Image (spheres, rainbow, N blue to C red):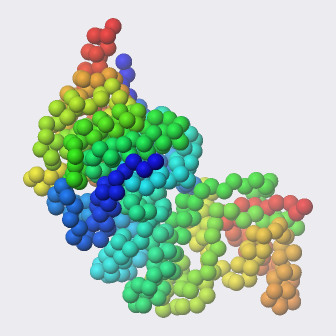
């Protein structure tokens, strides 16, 4: 049953429209000074939250460009999440989906924003319980490496995880990154990967495989005949990941 | 008698709350939206704090004053969160943060109108049913009325009565609104259903212009607000009291001193009340 008059509903819509756009929108029985403060306060919530989430992007853009980005998002995007800490992700989707002048000037802007978001996402993502039994050690002969489930594996077009932004944008290419959260302190770490190791991690995410089995698959996929050499590299790779807590141990192969 | 004096949980002093070296609140209040759907470091910290203290919770995004439907998916998540964290009292603002299917994350003033009283009360009743508990509705600070048909006290009374909910009385907001809209704060307090108050908020504010105060939670509580608090607690039964401080943090001893001040005032008022009822 509808209990709110159209008139009151319209008042509320016009109030939020004013806050978001700042365009003159006469509302009866209001005072201009108070209205301006609502506009200022609501804009500041967006600006402060985005500044905290995207310090690299904010520093890279000049002040006018940053304000243009925030203002365009605030006025032009309907935020869907009730959780303010998740709102910055919607800036990424807004930039990705819309034709913005800033993207013409900085084609890497969506990737930069996404990269910064990934750190927040991996840091705060919900805990993933490990149901399988495993041994927290690095004995990877004939066993299945257990990859830390709190991770993301992504491909970037710029080495944003390796270089400061101004250098990274001069080096377009194909970069693969493992971003994971260490289980003890909850800190986020980035590891640059070769395409072969990405392939290995992707295969492991789909099924339990030993290093031997992975070496055969890599040999077939990449046309490398020396599986012994591949095994040696894989073993070193997983031992290194274990040392960094990107791999938590091993499971016996069933 | 032991009046409960609490503090709003902020990430800036979460470790201190775990260690209890300088801050010694009786309970903590958290905004669920700042902690929901989080794992890792912050989930661990939240668990450490909630294992140590009784918890109340102060919602930000339920948007009880919105024209549109409640967000039922969010309500389900919220219910789960409140249960998992053993939240004893849940409160929300008498305002709206969302219209036209867009969150704005600021607390906007509901027009003080007859139809809005009925509409908001209906939504609060529905939210209470979905959450399986009463909600304490907070009187918010507002910087402009919007085509009002009644004053704030009448609006607030109407909502609390029709919704059969509790009240979270923010004494600082009463002070701020009385100053900004030129009315008598004590008379406003007298008109409220004080028997419905589930707990009290106290905070600092900032005078940004000679005739305008903004409710910032970024300053210490000023003496006139302490006096209004004293006036209020002398007229109502004992309830928990919470200190809000959201930024511009002072030394922790200063926050503890503010809690001590609140305790001293409540002990005087409620010791007297308890003696009278003996």
Residue A195 on image: x %, y %: 70, 84
Residue A188: horizontal and vertical position, in percent?
Answer: 56, 65
Q: At 37% across and 40% down in the image, what residue appears?
A: B137
In this view, B219 is above or below B134: below
Q: Quadrant of the C terminus of chain A?
A: bottom right
Which residue is rendered at x = 31% and y = 54% of the image? A8
Q: Is residue B223 visible?
A: no
Q: Is residue B161 visible?
A: yes
Name which residue lies at 44% across and 65% down.
A79
**Which residue is at the front of the view, B108 or B123?**
B123
Residue B202: % across, % down? 28, 38
In the depicted structure, whether residue B105 falls above or below residue B51? below
Farthest left residue?
A: B210
Q: Nearer the viewer, residue B163 or B219?
A: B163
Q: Is residue A90 above or below residue B233?
A: below
Q: Residue at x 15, y 52 (%)?
A: B212
**Where, by quadrant of the figure, is residue B94 drawn?**
top left
């Amino acid at each position: 049953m509808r209990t709110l008059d159209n008139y009151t509903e319209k008042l509320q819509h016009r109030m939020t429209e004013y806050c978001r756009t700042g365009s003159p929108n006469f509302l009866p029985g209001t005072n201009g000074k108070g209205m301006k403060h609502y506009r200022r306060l609501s804009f500041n919530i967006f600006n402060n939250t985005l500044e905290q989430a995207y310090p690299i992007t904010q520093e890279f853009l000049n002040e006018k460009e940053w304000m243009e980005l925030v203002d365009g998002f605030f006025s032009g995007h309907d935020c869907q999440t009730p959780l303010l800490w998740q709102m910055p992700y919607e800036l990424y989707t807004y930039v990705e989906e819309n034709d913005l002048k800033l993207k013409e000037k900085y084609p890497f802007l969506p990737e930069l924003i996404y990269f910064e978001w990934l750190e927040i996402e991996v840091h705060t993502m919900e805990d993933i319980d490990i149901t399988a039994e495993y041994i927290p050690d690095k004995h990877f002969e004939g066993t299945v490496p257990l990859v830390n489930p709190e991770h993301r594996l992504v491909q970037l077009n710029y080495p944003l995880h390796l270089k400061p932004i101004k250098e990274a944008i001069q080096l377009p290419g194909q970069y693969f990154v493992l971003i994971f959260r260490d289980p003890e302190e909850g800190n986020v770490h980035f590891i640059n990967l070769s395409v072969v190791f990405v392939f290995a991690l992707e295969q492991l995410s789909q099924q339990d495989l030993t290093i031997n089995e992975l070496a055969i698959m890599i040999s077939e996929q990449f046309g490398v005949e020396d599986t012994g050499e591949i095994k040696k590299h894989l073993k070193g790779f997983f031992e290194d990941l274990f040392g960094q807590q990107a791999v938590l141990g091993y499971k016996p192969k069933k | 008698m032991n009046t409960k004096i609490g503090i709003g949980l902020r990430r800036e002093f979460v470790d201190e709350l775990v260690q209890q070296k300088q801050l010694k609140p009786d309970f903590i209040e958290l905004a669920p939206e700042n902690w929901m759907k989080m794992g890792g470091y912050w989930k661990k910290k939240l668990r450490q704090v909630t294992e140590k203290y009784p918890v109340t919770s102060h919602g930000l995004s339920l948007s009880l004053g919105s024209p549109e439907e409640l967000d039922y998916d969010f309500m389900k998540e919220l219910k789960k969160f409140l249960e998992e964290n053993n939240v004893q009292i849940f409160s929300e603002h008498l305002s709206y943060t969302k219209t036209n299917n867009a969150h704005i994350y600021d607390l906007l003033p509901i027009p003080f109108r007859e139809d809005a009283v009925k509409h908001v009360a209906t939504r609060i009743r529905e939210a209470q049913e979905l959450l399986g508990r009463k909600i304490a509705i907070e009187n918010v600070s507002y910087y402009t009325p919007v085509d009002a048909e009644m004053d704030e006290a009448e609006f607030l009374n109407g909502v609390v009565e029709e919704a059969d909910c509790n009240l979270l009385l923010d004494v600082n907001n009463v002070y701020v609104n009385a100053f900004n809209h030129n009315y008598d704060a004590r008379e406003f307090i007298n008109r409220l259903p004080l028997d419905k108050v589930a707990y009290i908020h106290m905070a600092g504010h900032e005078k940004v212009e000679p005739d305008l105060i903004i409710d910032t939670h970024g300053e210490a509580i000023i003496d006139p607000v302490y006096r209004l608090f004293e006036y209020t607690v002398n007229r109502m039964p004992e309830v928990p009291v919470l200190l809000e401080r959201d930024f511009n943090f002072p030394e922790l001893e200063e926050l503890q001193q503010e809690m001590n001040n609140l305790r001293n005032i409540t002990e005087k008022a409620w010791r007297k009340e308890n003696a009278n009822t003996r």
